[in-house]
Amino acid sequence: MSGTVRVVVVGGGYAGVMAANRAAGGTPGTAPVEVVLLDPGTQFTERIRLHQVGAGGRNTAGVDWAEVLHPQVRRMQARALSIDSGNRRIRGDHGSVRFDWLVYAVGSGEQPTALLSVTNRAAAGSTREAIAGLAPGSAVTVAGAGPTGVEVASALAVARPDLLITIVAPSGLAHPVTGRHAVARRLQHLKISVEEGVVDPVTGTITSGGHSRPSAAATIWTAGLAVPSLASDSGLPVDGDGRLLVDATLTVPGHERIIGAGDAVCVTGAAGAHLRASCAAAIPMGAHAADTVLARLSGVAPSAIDIGYLAQCLDLGAGRGHLQLVHPDDAPRVVALSGRSAGWAKEQICRMTVAWLAREARRPGSFRGPTGPAVPVG
């Protein structure tokens, strides 16, 4: 090969930054690699800390790009609007950029809603301001009882114990049965109510037991994520949720030069059946996406992705948490840990995610999980 090969990574989340850092250190064949990261953010966002920001317990979840990004990665502060796969160009809100290889890592965002959320830094900041303005005794509804809902409610109860907080979800707590009782006890201790019901994503109206009541003083939506429509708008193959379809090497069928990683990607077949939207999946997927590009540039067949999980963990506020050991396919084991020890473990995990990205920026190719390319926790 001759000339510079340009790898453009769309999206600066956990998957995108890992992919950019890893690709920046690659020197396949004789062609130098230029890596461009296309992202509208002014900082890298620690998305797994946004619940703390929204609740008012943390000022920011932003990290300077220089801390996590390889110095040879060229960052373009722009949002991708369309992908022209035939001409290998990406049109953004600040012009267009050519690519030889594209890593699609746009992540996920909130479902359409007029309510508060903690999906991104701007949304978390707005939620923080709204919560700060509430009078003591005000009612707050957290729509959704998944991990984000439980973490938001717990952080809020610690930061504002004077509020009346209720988690509303169709089936109550969604955590694995082996840990549900421990989580429920912690929520009870924090005086957080859990109610079976449905929250209207526009008005915040609550329907429970066949009856409806007006929205609370504040409603925080955590009941689902959606992916950007960039792939479908660009004519690329997507699943029913709009996620980019990729094979086990993370390559888009029929588009060999487009590789996908992270929340906005659906890995077809057995290799991706257990993968869920999480930084635990996004980081190793980003590494594998870069490996696929570098392998093809070197004339080597890329390998199939093979990652698994070790644990799920929750931040339950005030240094307490819950850690549930799981099988590689994410099915829960019988062993779980709760309390301060689990809270400490959760905090170490949050720190490790940034440390992994920073280490890959300094030494591309260094990221390895304890079971191969897998991240140990999520």
Image (cartoon, rainbow, N blue to C red):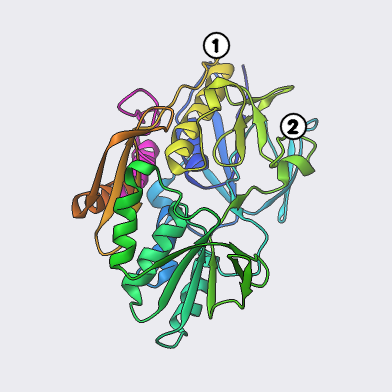
Q: Which one is nearer the viewer's eye here, 81 or 137? A: 137
Note whether 175 is above or below 209 in the view shown. above
Residue 110 rendering spot, x and y as whole percentages = 60, 57
Q: Foreground mark, 1 or 2? A: 2
Indicate whether residue 52 is drawn in magenta: no
Answer with left or right where residue 239 lies relative to residue 77: right
> Which residue type does callout 1 highlight?
Val
In x, y percent, where is residue 174? 46, 49
Q: Quadrant of residue 70?
A: top left
**Quadrant of residue 320 within the rendered picture:** bottom left
Image quarter (top left, top right, bottom left or bottom right) of the C terminus: top left
Badges 1 and 2: C-beta atoms under 8 Å apart? no
Distance Cα–Cα, label 1 vs label 2: 25 Å
Between disc 1 and disc 2, whose residue precedes?
A: 2
Q: Residue at x 56, y 69 (%)?
A: 116
- Check the image and report above or below for 6 versus 189: above
Q: Which mark is residue 357?
A: none
Find disc 1 in the rendering and name its residue.
300
